[in-house]
Image (tube, grey):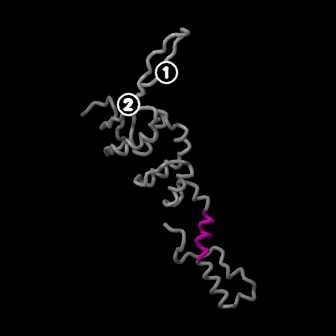
Amino acid sequence: MSRAAIPGLPSAHPIGELLPALFAEDDFAQRFTAGLDTVLAPVFATLDSLPAYFDPRLAPADFLDWLASWVAVEVDPAWPEEVRRAVVERALELHRWRGTRRGLTERLRLVLGAGAEIEDGAGASWTTDPGAVPPPAAGGDVLIRVWPLRGQGLDEDQVLSVVRAGCPVHLNCRVEILPGPPGRAED
């Protein structure tokens, strides 16, 4: 959508009506200002509705990607528009929980409509004995089991893309795509 030249868009503030009385009857002045009204009408319409441009629920679709860059969220153009709007709207929350189990689970649910179970193999170890040899470092593997919450299956490339964006870089994330929630009896 272009906010440039919209055919037939009337100006909310016609310039010809604002001219002094001397020019009110002047045909050239009225035609000249009508041409300016045509150019300025989209500008006035945009400015009059400016607050809507900053609301992800109301912003024009082509403005949404730019708005996403303002809140440092990457949205895939292949995602449906309602998913992109939801991700931009919840950007603060997604940033707050980024790199955590909750954040990754929420992002998978929001973007792909997928449930997730995350098993973290890493951990911290400690000892009460001073000078004791620390135990071997725990493996940095994280197992992420993902299943569709709605009827359709999940695209492996999309799942991996979302997991890569939300999994901390120092961890090795393994992904398993399941047909349904784990532990559910197969019929």
Left or right of 37? Residue 178 is left
Judging by the rendered image, the residue that carries numbered circle 1 is 124
Expressed as whole percent of the image width and height from the top left, the position of residue 132 reads 51, 10
Which residue range is magenta in the image?
Answer: 39-49
Q: To which quarter of the image does residue 157 belong?
A: top left
Specify the amino acid type for callout 1.
Answer: Ala
Q: Position of residue 185 (x, y in %)?
A: 28, 30
The quarter in which the C terminus is drawn is: top left
Question: Would you say residue 163 sits in the magenta stretch?
Answer: no
- Above or below for 179 versus 131: below
Horizontal side of residue 114 vs 34, given as left or right:
left
Is 41 one of the magenta-colored residues?
Answer: yes
Frontmost residue, 147 versus 136: 136
* Residue ranking furthest to the left: 187
CB under 8 Å between discs 2 and 1:
no
- Crowdedness near tag 1: few (<14), some (14–19) or many (≥20) residues, C-alpha within 10 Å: few
What residue lies at 56% left-to-right and 75% top-to-bottom? 9
Question: Between disc 2 and disc 1, whose residue precedes?
Answer: 1
Helix, strand or loop under label 2: strand
Distance between mark 2 and mark 1 Cα atoms: 18 Å
Magenta segment, prevailing SS (helix, strand or loop):
helix
Nearer the camera: disc 2 or disc 1: 1
Residue type indicated by callout 2: Leu
Disc ID at residue 143: 2
Q: Position of residue 44 (x, y in %)?
A: 62, 70
Above or below, 73 against 126 in this view is below
Q: Specify few, some or many for label 2: CA neighbours under 10 Å numbering under 14, 14-19, or 20 or more.
A: some
